[in-house]
Image (cartoon, rainbow, N blue to C red):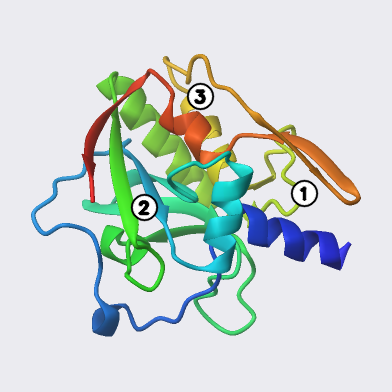
Amino acid sequence: MRVRTVLLSGLLALTACSDNIGREGTILPAGLRLSVGDVVFRRGGGFTSHAVLMADNGGVYSHVGIVADSAGQLVVIHAVPGEPDFEGDEDRVKMERPADFFARMRADRGAVYRPLDSIAARQAAHRAVAIYRRHTLFDHDYDDSDTTAMYCTELVVHAYSKTRRPMSGLSRHHLHLVGFEADCVLPSDILHCKDFKLITTF
């Protein structure tokens, strides 16, 4: 079971990074204006990022989150393993500043996509905050039918599924590893959803 967890975590999420965000900087462009409900994508340069891209049939990004409002500040909510905030921290849904989500140590490429429906955007962001506040753990089994734990794309899709405009025409990838088989949503599946428009890539 532990071997499978390690393989899947390496396949579908970025690896752990240190907390020296201020020293390393961010790839987030200065002056870029994010909006509540935006779906943000990133790609790292490490082994696990490349593994995701291979599983995603040559996809461009390896991780995804959703922009929300927290006490008047924009944040990114995302489900990720291997990025503890403190010793003993569990793999879980995190809330962090956009600059931290796009820290250079975690990302070498990024993109922002905005939903066409602004009301659905606010509804999805509100749902994502609720998922974070219930201390949702990362889903190492990648089981979309169980929302007590979530992986990165599952969180975004689920948040929008509770709005007046769920993601339409969403495809999935069939993954088959030793001792594991599942149909999962990968970043490119969300990227190709027609309910969003590209704001920028960087």
Say which amino acid is labelled 1. Asp
Separation (CA) of disc 2 from disc 3: 18 Å
- Please name which of the two marks, 2 or 1, marks the residue nearer to the observer: 1
Instruction: Tell me residue 181's x, y (percent).
Output: 83, 40
Instruction: Tell me residue 10's x, y (percent).
Output: 65, 62
Query: Which residue bears the numbered disc 1?
Result: 141
Residue depicted at 54% across the width and 49% down the height: 53
N-term mark: 2 or 1:
2
Query: Which residue bears the numbered disc 2?
Result: 76
In the rendered image of this protein, does residue 87 appear above or below residue 131? below
Instruction: Tell me residue 109's x, y (percent).
Output: 33, 55
In the rendered image of this protein, does residue 1 appear above or below residue 76? below
Crowdedness of circle 2 by 10 Å Cα count: few (<14), some, many (20+)?
many
Instruction: Give the quadrant of the N terminus.
Output: bottom right
Crowdedness of circle 1 by 10 Å Cα count: few (<14), some, many (20+)?
some
Query: Which residue bears the numbered disc 3?
Result: 162
Tag 3's secondary structure?
Answer: loop
Tag 1's secondary structure?
Answer: loop
Closer-to-camera residue (193/76): 193
Closer-to-camera residue (73/48): 48
For residue 106, side relative to residue 81 (left or right)? left
Residue depicted at 53% across the width and 81% down the height: 86
